[in-house]
Amino acid sequence: MSNVNWKPFVFGGLASVTAECGTFPIDLAKTRLQVQGQVGDSKYREIRYRGMLHAMVRIGSEEGLRALYSGIAPAMLRQASYGTIKIGTYQSFKRLLVERPEDETLLTNVVCGVLSGVISSSIANPTDVLKIRMQAQGNVIQGSMMVNFINIYQKEGTRGLWKGVSLTAQRAAIVVGVELPVYDLTKKHLILSGYMGDTVYTHFLSSFVCGLAGALASNPVDVVRTRMMNQRGVALYQGTVDCLLQTWRSEGFMALYKGFFPNWLRLGPWNIIFFLTYEQLKNINV
């Protein structure tokens, strides 16, 4: 490959930002559900929300509708960086390994997905920390994204901005390593079956399937990542395994699937908006 194709980078970033705007309140509800019920943290010990809809209604009524978009600025910045690098590197890695899309295999796509997920999430980790902190606290946190960024840096240093980076990379490796290959594979088989062409309906169904697969595979890691990123001061969890085991022992195995439905209900529409936008952008001649 003599030249890197810039289109997947730009189109991936634009599609990611569009999808984030459309599904952000669901993501905020998921974060609130995941941090509640922690036995070792009095601030989050209370079970305030019974589910996604209850969380969204209560947040809106108690904190105002603007609170449903707490953390939207770092989320947009995250997608502009993470989404751009993720899709661009995924498509570039695939073309490095195979020249034609028809020659791609599941193994090829999984390897490319895992690598692109790890690289993109590691670079964008500070924006993820900012987003989760602002989502968890809602209107309690005062100031802009930059003010909160400086506050984290001054109190916790560079390590605070990259807190949970290994978990973020693990989650991204799982999500991207599952979602993008599942989308490509589903789309490929639907087209080859002859029942559906390369149409918006094929893109819709493929993105729905990949969203469900990604949610099932990533939710336990997502719960652990959210809790570790949200902790400050004295660490409640000493690492990934410790957080997973403490959560399992004190709250039960299903605690690892807290926020699953908002996670799925977000990943489903998110992927649908993303891939429909991305596929349309691909057809633009620039």
Image (spheres, rainbow, N blue to C red):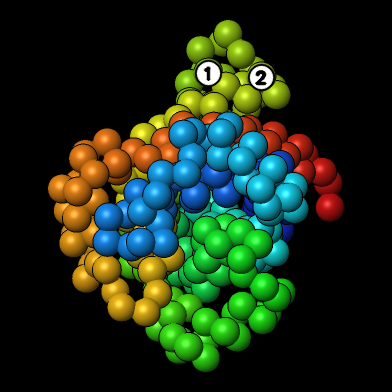
Residue name at image x 55 percent, y 44 percent = 29
User: Dividing the picture into quarters, in which one does residue 231 lie?
Assistant: bottom left
Mark 1, secondary structure of its residue:
helix
Mark 2, secondary structure of its residue:
helix
Query: Along the horizontal axis of the image, is 186 left or right of 284?
Result: left
Image mark for residue 201: 2
Q: Is residue 29 visible?
A: yes
- Residue 160: image x %, image y %? 43, 80
Q: Amino acid at mark 1?
A: Leu
Q: How far apart are labels 1 and 2 at the CA level?
A: 10 Å
- Residue 211: image x %, image y %? 49, 34
- Residue 24: image x %, image y %? 64, 47
User: Dividing the picture into quarters, in which one does residue 199 lie?
Assistant: top right
Residue name at image x 61 percent, y 59 percent = 138
The correct choice, above or below, for 156 with respect to 228 in the image is: below
Query: Along the horizontal axis of the image, is 52 left or right of 225?
Result: right
Q: Nearer the viewer, mark 1 or mark 2?
A: 2
Query: Along the horizontal axis of the image, is 136 left or right of 70?
Result: left
The residue closer to the viewer here, 98 or 82, is 82
Q: Amino acid at mark 2?
A: Tyr
The correct choice, above or below, for 5 with respect to 141 in the image is: above
- Specify few, some or many for label 2: CA neighbours under 10 Å numbering under 14, 14-19, or 20 or more: few
- Residue 228: image x %, image y %? 35, 64
The residue closer to the viewer here, 96 or 262, is 262
Residue name at image x 44 percent, y 86 percent = 156
Which quadrant of the figure contains the N terminus?
A: bottom right
- Specify few, some or many for label 1: CA neighbours under 10 Å numbering under 14, 14-19, or 20 or more: some
The residue closer to the viewer here, 146 or 9, is 146
Residue name at image x 45 percent, y 58 percent = 116
